[in-house]
Image (cartoon, rainbow, N blue to C red):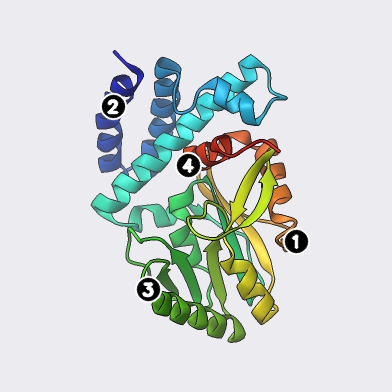
Amino acid sequence: MSGSDSARSFDWPGKLLARLVPFQPRLAFRLARILGAFRQRITRRWPTAAEVRALFPHLDDAAAERVARKIGALTECNRVLVHSILRSGIDPIRPLMSMPDSISAPCILGTFHVGAVHALGPALERLGKPVTSFRLGSIFTPRAPLVIESTEGSAEQRAAAFYRAMTQLRGGGYVVMALDIVTGSFIETRCLGRRLPLARGAFALSRMTGVPILPLVVRWTSDGVQIVIGDAPVTEETTGPWLEQYLVDSPAELTLGLLRTLLAAPLH
């Protein structure tokens, strides 16, 4: 059996686990972690230990293999999460969220494609003030005060959304924007020795409003999902180093999308 065929043979257990999430969410995601780690161990993909070592050369072979299995576990948790949201909505995920007591506002929250990337929505609903999250698309219907703005559409539509974000910040609210994995024009920085393109939007919004950007990541834990906020604001110059330090400290938080982006980028 080829690696891709072997990987596909694990799809059906993940879909079954998504059916379990509304009834036993913590159990479902614990089993998803076991499934993802086992899949990686059998297929040696998602990712390979060699791919992990290419980004974290300080790891020996055994440590790289352990990280690869944990990334496999993370990948399956995220897959089960998406299947569950599409099938049953976001309600079963809401009780799993753990957040800091407070996040000062106004504030731009800069996110990255690491950890539990699709679990952020229920946390943003708890901020208590108006919050606008920019996304390529939405897989759930948010509750107030969260509003999701699409990053798709015409230039006029994107400009109007940007203006609404400025108004929100000037009114004391929050705006959430991804900083990494860019399809259009970008700001170049480095992370893990590779070129990492950063989206311009959050930095432009920060300059125009004087509102700081705080880095935010979402982590799976043994008991649910945890929101982690950086201690200090980031800039165009410090975002790459912040993300690099986070990943060096927690390499298993690297998602496949960001891993492939970094591996495809030239070494610096």
In the picture of the structure, the residue carrying the numbered disc 4 is 257
Give the residue type at disc 4. Answer: Gly
The amino acid marked with disc number 3 is Ser
Q: Identify residue for label 1.
A: 232
Q: Amino acid at mark 1?
A: Ala
What is the CA distance from the residue labelled 4 to the residue labelled 3? Answer: 26 Å
Q: Nearer the viewer, mark 2 or mark 1?
A: 2
Q: Position of residue 20 (x, y in %)?
A: 28, 40
Residue 172: which quarter of the image? bottom right
Residue that carries the numbered disc 3 in the rendered image: 154
Q: Earlier in the sequence, mark 2 or mark 1?
A: 2
Marks 4,3: beta carbons within 8 A: no
Q: Which residue is mark 2?
A: 8
Say few, some or many: other residues with alpha carbon within 10 Å of mark 2 (under 14 / 14 to 19 / 20 or more). Answer: few
The answer to whether residue 259 of the structure is visible from this angle is yes
Q: Estimate the x, y position of residue 228 in percent, counting from the top left.
A: 62, 53
Dot 3 or dot 1: first in sequence order is 3
Nearer to me, 30 or 60? 60
Q: Who comes first in sequence, dot 4 or dot 3?
A: 3
Dot 2 or dot 4, earlier in sequence: 2
Q: Residue at x 64, y 31 (%)?
A: 55
**Residue 215, percent from left and from top:** 64, 58
Q: Earlier in the sequence, mark 1 or mark 4?
A: 1
